[in-house]
Amino acid sequence: MTKAKPYTAAVRTFLDELATFFVASEIERDVLKPFLEKEMGKPYNEIVTEGYLAQVLRDNPESERAWKALQRVIIKRRKGMLAALERERNQHG
């Protein structure tokens, strides 16, 4: 088995941004939302005007830029994978 090449600095930076998105989402979903809903007795979206991930993105323009790029890629990938599944279904009846 060949040794994997190290990631470029740009790839490492983007992976760091991805980790930021996932961790911020997890913190909001698993910690902040349950805590605030329990303490305030209201749904999370009625308590906060802006979610934690949105705050993280607002405070870091490069993260926001990467997030928007990721969203575009996700939409493109979903469409491509759906089209492939539809082609496969049509081939196999």
Image: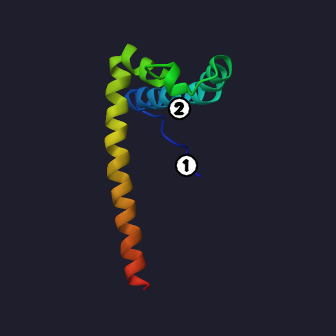
Q: How is the image coloured?
A: rainbow
Residue highlighted by disc 1 = 2
Residue depicted at 57% across the width and 28% down the height: 43
For the residue marked with disc 2, what is the amino acid? Phe
Is residue 21 shown above or below 5? above
Q: Nearer the viewer, residue 79 or 7?
A: 79
Q: Position of residue 63 (x, y in %)?
A: 38, 23
Quadrant placement of the C terminus: bottom left
State the SS at label 2.
Answer: helix
Q: Position of residue 75 (x, y in %)?
A: 34, 48
Q: Nearer the viewer, residue 13 or 3?
A: 13
| 66 on left or right of 3 | left
Q: Nearer the viewer, residue 4 or 42?
A: 42
> Where, by quadrant of the figure, is residue 42 drawn?
top right
Q: Residues within 10 Å of mark 2 (few under 14, many from 20)?
A: few
State the SS at label 1.
Answer: loop
The answer to whether residue 46 shows anywhere in this view is: yes
